[in-house]
Protein backbone atom coordinates (compact mmCIF):
# COMPACT_ATOMS: atom_id res chain seq x y z
CA UNK A 1 0.00 0.00 0.00
CA UNK A 2 1.40 3.40 -0.98
CA UNK A 3 1.62 6.21 1.56
CA UNK A 4 -0.80 9.02 0.86
CA UNK A 5 0.19 12.63 1.50
CA UNK A 6 -1.41 14.32 4.49
CA UNK A 7 -4.36 16.64 4.03
CA UNK A 8 -2.24 19.72 4.77
CA UNK A 9 0.28 18.91 2.04
CA UNK A 10 -2.51 18.25 -0.45
CA UNK A 11 -4.10 21.60 0.42
CA UNK A 12 -0.78 23.42 0.24
CA UNK A 13 -0.22 22.07 -3.25
CA UNK A 14 -3.73 22.89 -4.42
CA UNK A 15 -4.01 26.51 -3.28
CA UNK A 16 -3.46 28.97 -6.10
CA UNK A 17 -1.59 32.21 -5.49
CA UNK A 18 1.75 33.28 -4.11
CA UNK A 19 2.87 35.82 -1.54
CA UNK A 20 2.59 36.53 2.16
CA UNK A 21 -0.86 34.94 2.36
CA UNK A 22 0.53 31.75 0.87
CA UNK A 23 3.45 31.71 3.26
CA UNK A 24 1.12 32.20 6.24
CA UNK A 25 -1.11 29.36 5.04
CA UNK A 26 1.86 27.08 4.50
CA UNK A 27 3.26 27.75 7.98
CA UNK A 28 -0.19 27.18 9.49
CA UNK A 29 -0.48 23.88 7.67
CA UNK A 30 3.07 22.89 8.61
CA UNK A 31 2.07 23.39 12.24
CA UNK A 32 -0.72 20.87 11.69
CA UNK A 33 -3.54 23.41 11.96
CA UNK A 34 -6.08 22.68 9.23
CA UNK A 35 -7.66 25.73 7.65
CA UNK A 36 -11.44 26.05 7.53
CA UNK A 37 -12.75 25.47 3.99
CA UNK A 38 -16.09 26.75 2.72
CA UNK A 39 -18.33 25.65 -0.12
CA UNK A 40 -19.27 28.11 -2.86
CA UNK A 41 -22.68 28.63 -1.20
CA UNK A 42 -21.14 29.20 2.24
CA UNK A 43 -18.64 31.67 0.79
CA UNK A 44 -21.53 33.52 -0.84
CA UNK A 45 -23.33 33.84 2.49
CA UNK A 46 -20.16 35.08 4.19
CA UNK A 47 -19.44 37.67 1.49
CA UNK A 48 -23.08 38.60 0.94
CA UNK A 49 -22.90 37.48 -2.69
CA UNK A 50 -24.74 34.97 -4.83
CA UNK A 51 -23.34 31.63 -5.92
CA UNK A 52 -23.03 32.99 -9.46
CA UNK A 53 -21.04 35.99 -8.26
CA UNK A 54 -18.66 33.74 -6.30
CA UNK A 55 -18.21 31.64 -9.45
CA UNK A 56 -17.31 34.83 -11.36
CA UNK A 57 -14.81 35.88 -8.67
CA UNK A 58 -13.17 32.45 -9.00
CA UNK A 59 -13.15 32.61 -12.81
CA UNK A 60 -11.52 36.08 -12.72
CA UNK A 61 -8.92 34.86 -10.24
CA UNK A 62 -10.20 37.15 -7.46
CA UNK A 63 -10.80 34.21 -5.11
CA UNK A 64 -8.42 31.30 -4.59
CA UNK A 65 -9.78 27.82 -4.04
CA UNK A 66 -8.69 24.27 -3.34
CA UNK A 67 -10.07 21.10 -4.83
CA UNK A 68 -11.40 18.57 -2.35
CA UNK A 69 -12.23 15.61 -4.51
CA UNK A 70 -14.25 17.08 -7.37
CA UNK A 71 -15.51 20.05 -5.34
CA UNK A 72 -14.07 23.54 -5.04
CA UNK A 73 -13.61 24.85 -1.51
CA UNK A 74 -12.57 28.35 -0.52
CA UNK A 75 -10.16 28.75 2.41
CA UNK A 76 -11.20 31.07 5.25
CA UNK A 77 -8.04 33.14 4.77
CA UNK A 78 -8.99 33.78 1.15
CA UNK A 79 -12.39 35.13 2.21
CA UNK A 80 -10.78 37.36 4.85
CA UNK A 81 -8.27 38.68 2.30
CA UNK A 82 -11.03 39.37 -0.21
CA UNK A 83 -13.10 41.25 2.38
CA UNK A 84 -10.06 43.36 3.29
CA UNK A 85 -9.39 44.12 -0.38
CA UNK A 86 -13.02 45.19 -0.84
CA UNK A 87 -12.75 47.50 2.19
CA UNK A 88 -9.57 49.03 0.78
CA UNK A 89 -11.28 49.68 -2.57
CA UNK A 90 -14.19 51.43 -0.85
CA UNK A 91 -11.86 53.62 1.20
CA UNK A 92 -9.80 54.47 -1.89
CA UNK A 93 -12.94 55.70 -3.71
CA UNK A 94 -13.68 58.27 -1.00
Image (cartoon, rainbow, N blue to C red):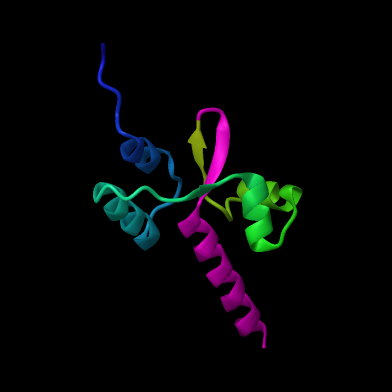
- Quarter of the image that includes the N terminus: top left
Q: Is residue 70 magenta?
A: yes
Foreground pick, 2 / 60: 2
Foreground pick, 85 / 51: 51
- Quarter of the image that includes the C terminus: bottom right
The residue drawn where x is 68% and y is 57% is 45
The region drawn magenta spans 69-94
The residue drawn where x is 49% and y is 56% is 76
Residue 86 appears left or right of 27: right
Establish if 90 lies above or below 37.
below
Residue 77 appears left or right of 90: left
* Residue 6 sits in quarter: top left
Give the x, y percent position of residue 74.
54, 48
The residue drawn where x is 63% and y is 51% is 42
Farthest residue toward the top?
1
Residue 8 appears left or right of 42: left
Determine the main secondary structure of the stretch shown in magenta.
Answer: helix
Amino acid sequence: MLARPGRASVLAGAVRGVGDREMARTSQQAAGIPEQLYSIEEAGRILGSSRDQIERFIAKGELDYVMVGARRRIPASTLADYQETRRERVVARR
